[in-house]
Amino acid sequence: MRKVLIVTLMLMLALGACAHADDVKIGACIYRFNDAFMLRFRQAMQAESEKLGAKIELADGQDNQSTQDEQVDAFIADGVNVLIVNPVDRMSSQSIIDKAKTAGIPVVFINREPTEEMLATYDKAYYVGAKAEESGTEAGELVASYFKAHPEADKNKDGKLQFILLKGQNGHQDMILRSKYSVEAVKEAGIEPVELAGAIANWDKLEAMKIMNGFIMSIGPENIEAVIANNDEMALGAIEALKAQDYNTGNPEAYIPVVGVDANASALEAMDKGEMLGTVLNDADGQGSAAVKLAVSLAKNAGAEGADGKYIWVPYQKVVRGEKQ
């Protein structure tokens, strides 16, 4: 029985006064609905909207920026009081900010962070999310801790960590920072990291499984000492590829530690089975709730109490089998 206690940080308590927001209409644009993390995020936003009495309508951008731009236009034309946007391409956020500014309505970005310069162009533009470098650091620390505690993990006994890196979407700030800081954390732990191979797998389980299959065939599982994935879905894809080679199926002599980010249900189950080393909680519930609270507060001209300038930050938390660190 898993004993992982996930505690959602209660942020922005001052925004609790936003109850009775039945006159607030939120237009929420999601980069694509077919994403496990954003499904949880959407559910949290819907639950918080219902709790506050606000109306929320969600649109599926289908991973197409042009489609999402049209949805933003439609929401504005429909008279929403505030936008929540998970941009398909975060570098297109300026256009969305400009549209919101022209319409005179606030915009809250989630999951994909616009640049500071973009947010600075509109006093009613904000971002709710988590600092991606934290998740990278914590994922790297999970691997480093395991490597130090299990001498057998150093298969070639060279004192170095030979690893595979599975990365999210090209250009996404989480991909860039999680990749960088996970490797830096291994170095900080006094272990020299050696990247055997790495590839973009677009946050996708099936794509990661195919890529990992190729790495296993070309490198050999016996030469891989860890897999670091930017999210749980890619970690789970890597595990499926390993299991096909009789790795990570319960035999301690055929085990490769795999870590991800998100702490989704499938990852926690894989941890319970001993297939996955650990993950880092990316608190979709906390972020979704905070985004709606902020959106309602801004729509009612109640300010952005609890914000750090233009930001609401929700911390990450390490999760390993049987416990939260």
Image: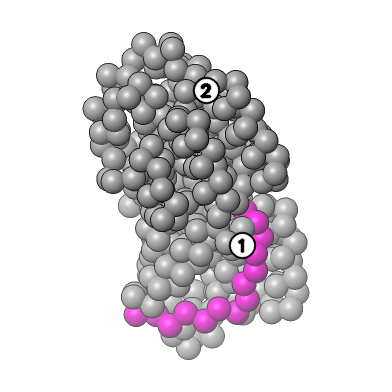
In magenta, the rendered stretch is 190-203
Q: Which residue is mark 1?
A: 170
Q: Could you tell me the amino acid type at mark 1?
A: Asn
Q: Which of 171 and 121 lies nearest the eye of the viewer?
A: 121
Dominant secondary structure, magenta: strand
> Could you say which is closer to the camera, residue 104 or residue 197?
104
Give the amino acid type for the residue marked by disc 2 in the picture: Val
Which numbered marker is on residue 116?
Answer: none
Percent coordinates x, y for residue 187 in the rendering:
38, 77
Would you say 277 lies left or right of 254 here? left
Say which element carries label 1: loop
Task: Determine if residue 286 is in view.
Answer: no
**Residue sitting nearer the eye, 117 or 252:** 117
Q: From the viewer's perspective, is 103 left or right of 51?
A: right
Residue 253 vertical position relative to residue 207 in the rendered view, above or below? below
Q: Is residue 196 in the magenta section?
A: yes
Q: Position of residue 319 (x, y in %)?
A: 41, 50
Asked if 52 appears above or below 104 in the picture, the reply is above
Q: Is residue 18 visible?
A: yes
Q: Is residue 63 above or below residue 137?
A: above
User: Percent x, y for residue 142?
Assistant: 41, 62
Give the mark nearer the N terminus: 2 vs 1.
2
Which structural element holds mark 2?
A: loop
Identified at 54% across, 85% down, the residue is: 156
Label at residue 80: 2
Q: Residues within 10 Å of mark 2 (few under 14, many from 20)?
A: many
Q: Is residue 308 magenta?
A: no
